Each structure stands twice: as C-alpha cells, then as structure tokens.
Amino acid sequence: MDVFVNGQFLPPDQARVRVDDAGFQHGVGLFETMSVHHGRAFRLDAHLARLAESARQLGLTRTLELAPLAEAVRQTITHNRIDRARIRLTLTGGTLSLLREGSTPSPEPTLLIAPTEPTAYDPQYFEQGIMVLVAPPAANPFDQLAGHKTLAYWGRLRTLRQAAAAGAGEAIWLAVTHHLASGSVSNVMLIKDGELHTPIARGEEEPGSLPAPVLPGITRAAVCEIAKARDILVRKRMLSVEDLLDADEVFLTNSSWQILPVTMVEKSTIADGQVGPVTRTLREALLEAIERETTQADT
C-alpha cells in the first residue's frame, strides 16, 4: 500500500524524509495508530484531537489544523482502496531549525500516513487470556513527555520485547510511585466487585495533584463509555500491584487488539484463571460499537 508523505502518495520504498528532520535526528514528533474498518478509521476525530493537544502542550506547534489531517487520512484510505487496515499517522518537528536558538520553527512538519495490514492475533488470546509481566517503576510524572504518544518509544518496545522473551504478551509499567501506569503499548483496566477501575490518565488529575504519566487511550475512553451505558461504575484512580493481583478480571486496551484479557500476572493467576464475563461483555460491545460507527452513513 502507498504511504502519504507531505501531500504525495508514494510506494513505501520510495518515501523519503530529510536527514535533518527532527523526528529522525532527535525523536521530536508524535504519532497516532488507528484501526480502519469498512474503509473508515475508528474515532478518527478523537485520535486527531489527542494529537493536537499533545502538539500544543509539548510545543511542537501552537495550532494544528485537524480538518486537513482528517482529509489526508481519508484520502489514504481511498487511494489504497482499504477496507480493513492499521494506519499510523506520524507528525515530526520538521527540519533542525526547530531546535536552533533564535530560529523560527519550521512551518511544515513532516507528515507521514502509513497503512499496513491489521495485526492478526491468535484467537486463543481472547478466549484464554494472556500472561503479563510487571516491569520496574519507570513511568515518571515529572517527565513532560509522559502521557503523550511521542516518537520516544524505544524504552516501551524494549520492555515489550523482554516480556515476549519470557512468554508474556505485555508488560505492565509502574509509575515511580509504584502505582500502576499502563502496559507498554496499552491501557490497563480491572474489574472488581462489578466495577471498572483504571489508572488516572493525563488530563484526568485532581487539581493540585501530580501529572499522570498515562496516555489517555482512545479505546480506553470508548470502553469507559460502554461500561457507563451498561450501568457499570467506572473509577479512575491510583491503583497498586495488589489491586491488580486481587482483581476479579483484568484486561488491556489499545486500537489494535481492542480488549485483550489478562489471566495471569507472572506466576499469579487472576481469580479463577478464566476470561471473565464482564471482559467478554465489554469486548463484544466494543466490537459492535466499532462496527456501528464505521458503517453508519455520513451526516
């Protein structure tokens, strides 16, 4: 499939970025990963709004025009005649003039939209659940980049690779306060006594509290909406490893696997070791919501 690079469609092996691009040189940039169903990106507007807010907060750009970005995503889908895919939108800081003292930031950051085939997960993951590891405390509320989807993903991918080498499907990150933060590439959710619990994400903090080093996931938000619609109480709060181990059900959310059940944390079994009924219900409802939202007619 062709990729979209700064207004042009090119085969992936012909796409180019400047050698002095701040994303390539210093990891200055943001990205969003979206799932496409029936030729539509699920919750495209929410993904782009999150991107724009991060760009504003981190100083990548003061304003980001969302309509042209959304149109570029739609054009990429149409150009490639996509029905089902995974799309990554990457926005970098452009040339290194962005980093030079007294210089004017580049008015044209590099924009790349790259579609790929959707990841094929083993159906047994959703039927039997996966094992996760608990990584050492690393998510830092004083890190200004924490809770944003920046290009600085090496640490997360390294941790994920270490988990895979141990036979685990994900690694749960802890904050430096030893509270639960997230997975390497996902948000964490727990079910306890019929209630849904999830760590506080960026933008959800109480006034005067420490910043939350947790990404406000788009799929996480959709699951919270679905839970509330089914009269499941949603609690966004500080959670401990003990809360994780004592949960009735545990699952992870992201745009690729939607809801992924967790039945073991290292050598500890969650409840009876089976995928729980609330997890199954929420996953089914989320898949129905994705189907509904990506097939509805434009208004």
Image (tube, rainbow, N blue to C red):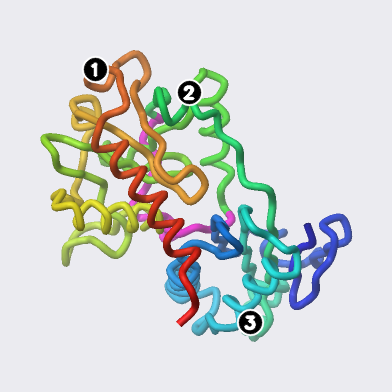
Numbered marks: total: 3
Q: Residue at x 56, y 65 (%)?
A: 40
Q: Nearer the viewer, mark 2 or mark 1?
A: 1
Residue 202's x, y, as percent? 32, 60
Give the CA distance from mark 1 to mark 3.
Answer: 55 Å
Dot 2 crowding, Cα within 10 Å, few <14, some 14–19, many 20+? some
Give the residue type that dot 2 points to. Ala
Rendered image: mark on residue 168:
2
- Secondary structure at numbered mark 2: loop
Q: Residue at x 37, y 45 (%)?
A: 187
Q: Nearer the viewer, mark 2 or mark 3?
A: 2
The residue to which callout 3 is attached is 105
Residue 6's x, y, as percent? 74, 75
Rendered image: mark on residue 124:
none
User: Majority secondary structure of the magenta segment?
Assistant: loop
Give the CA distance from mark 2 to mark 1.
Answer: 19 Å
Residue 272 included in the magenta stretch of the image = no
The residue to which callout 1 is attached is 272
- Secondary structure at numbered mark 1: loop
- Disc with the residue nearer the chain's start (1 vs 3): 3
Per the rendered image, the range of residues in magenta is: 135-151
Nearest to the observer: residue 212 or residue 12: 12
Give the residue type that dot 3 points to. Pro
**Where 44 falls versus 229 (above or below)?**
below
Residue 201's x, y, as percent? 30, 55
Dot 1 crowding, Cα within 10 Å, few <14, some 14–19, many 20+? few
